[in-house]
Image (spheres, helix red, strand yellow):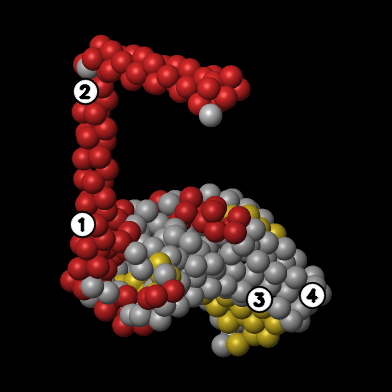
């Protein structure tokens, strides 16, 4: 294969930069500890992409940033059982197999910053739920326009650092807060997200105020509503939600009272329907008699003979 790679420390580190001739699967020397591939046009990472010969490699660090990777297939890193660090940042991942990280039982650090398309973001949770990532300690997902925390539970991971900065997260749900409370050793980074500071954020706000898991809590700012834009999430007042809840309850109570009054009024009308009918008939008869009197007077006043007699 004709591509230029640099070798450092007796082949322990292999660096392949800005080479368009690199193709996968790639035969890597068994003694290589660090492999850097950057600036290549790799659209698909196939199965066993770095151990085509089926050998178990001693690779500890694999850096694959800026390679235009669009798809990672199942068992793409099979054979890299000693891999500690995997960097897939700054690619354009659109498809991610649920088995993409199969075989990475010793992985400590996974970096996927600014690399996920919307479709890739949807497929990420299943890929992270694999039991292969049992020793993953640091997960970096900054700059991926994520709208929610992509991990519902942390049972299958060994995380102590989760970086979700610079995404599109508006709220942290109660399920996520419960998971954070259950796994208290995890430090979470959430700055540069457009938080919607309404009452749905109450559980998250309480978690921020009463814990220290969010390492950058002082940098969390409200984006919506406009009245609270730029306000620190930590400085929100719980009383605002209490007042809003009381106001909502008062409106509901007023609606119930008005509905009861309406029902009582209808019942009174129903129970007195006979008397109301007689009353309406009496009014109608009275109106009819009055109209007949007016009609009679009109006919007499319009008779010219009666007018002459009057003269």
10 Å crowding of disc 2: few (<14), some (14-19), many (20+): few
Whether residues under marks 3 and 4 lie with C-beta atoms below 8 angstroms apart, the answer is: no
Q: Identify the secondary structure beneath mark 1.
A: helix
Tell which circle, 2 or 1, labels the residue nearer the N-terminal end: 1
Residue identified by numbered label 4:
20
Q: Identify the secondary structure beneath mark 2.
A: helix
Residue identified by numbered label 1:
246
Spatial CA span between label 3 and label 1 = 53 Å
Tell which circle, 3 or 4, labels the residue nearer the N-terminal end: 4
Please state which of the two labelled residues, at mark 4 or mark 1, is closer to the viewer: 1
Whether residues under marks 3 and 1 lie with C-beta atoms below 8 angstroms apart, the answer is: no
Residue identified by numbered label 2:
268
Is residue 133 toward the left or the right of residue 26 in the image? Answer: left
Residue 50: image location, x then y, percent: 62, 63
Q: Identify the secondary structure beneath mark 4.
A: loop
Which disc, if any, is residue 66?
3
Which disc, if any, is residue 266?
none
Is residue 79 toward the left or the right of residue 250 in the image? Answer: right
**Image quarter of residue 229:** bottom left
Q: Identify the secondary structure beneath mark 3.
A: loop
- Of the pair 231 and 308, the residue shown nearer to us: 308
10 Å crowding of disc 3: few (<14), some (14-19), many (20+): many
Q: Residue at x 59, y 64 (%)?
A: 116
Spatial CA span between label 3 and label 4 = 12 Å
Q: Can residue 126 be seen in this view?
A: yes
Tell which circle, 4 or 1, labels the residue nearer the N-terminal end: 4
């Amino acid at each position: 294969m004709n591509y230029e790679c640099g070798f450092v420390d007796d082949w322990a580190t292999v660096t392949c930069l800005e080479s368009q001739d690199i193709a996968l699967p790639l035969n890597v020397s068994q003694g290589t500890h660090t492999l850097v591939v950057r600036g290549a046009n790799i659209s698909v990472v196939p199965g066993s992409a770095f151990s085509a010969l089926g050998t178990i490699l001693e690779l500890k660090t694999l850096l694959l940033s800026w390679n235009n990777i669009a798809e990672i297939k199942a068992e793409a890193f099979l054979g890299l059982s000693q891999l500690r660090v995997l960097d897939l940042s700054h690619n354009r991942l659109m498809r991610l197999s649920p088995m993409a990280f199969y075989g990475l039982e010793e992985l400590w650090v996974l970096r996927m910053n600014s690399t996920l398309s919307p479709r890739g973001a949807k497929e990420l949770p299943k890929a992270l739920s694999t039991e292969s990532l049992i020793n993953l300690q640091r997960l970096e997902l900054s700059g991926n326009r994520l709208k929610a925390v992509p991990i519902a539970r942390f049972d299958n991971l060994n995380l102590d650092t989760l970086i979700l900065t610079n995404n599109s997260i508006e709220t942290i749900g109660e399920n996520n807060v419960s998971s954070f409370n259950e796994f208290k050793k995890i430090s979470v980074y959430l700055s540069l997200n457009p938080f919607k500071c309404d009452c749905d954020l109450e559980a998250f706000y309480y978690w921020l105020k009463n814990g220290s898991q969010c390492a950058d809590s002082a940098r969390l700012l409200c984006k919506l509503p406009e009245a609270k834009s730029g306000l620190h999430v930590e400085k929100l007042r719980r009383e605002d939600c209490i007042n809003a809840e009381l106001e909502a309850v008062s409106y509901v109570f007023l609606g119930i009272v008005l509905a009861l009054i309406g029902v009582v009024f209808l019942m009174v009308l129903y129970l007195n329907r006979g008397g109301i009918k007689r009353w309406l008939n009496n009014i109608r008869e009275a109106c009819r008699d009055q109209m007949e009197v007016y009609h009679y007077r009109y006919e007499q006043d319009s008779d010219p003979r009666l007018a002459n007699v009057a003269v």
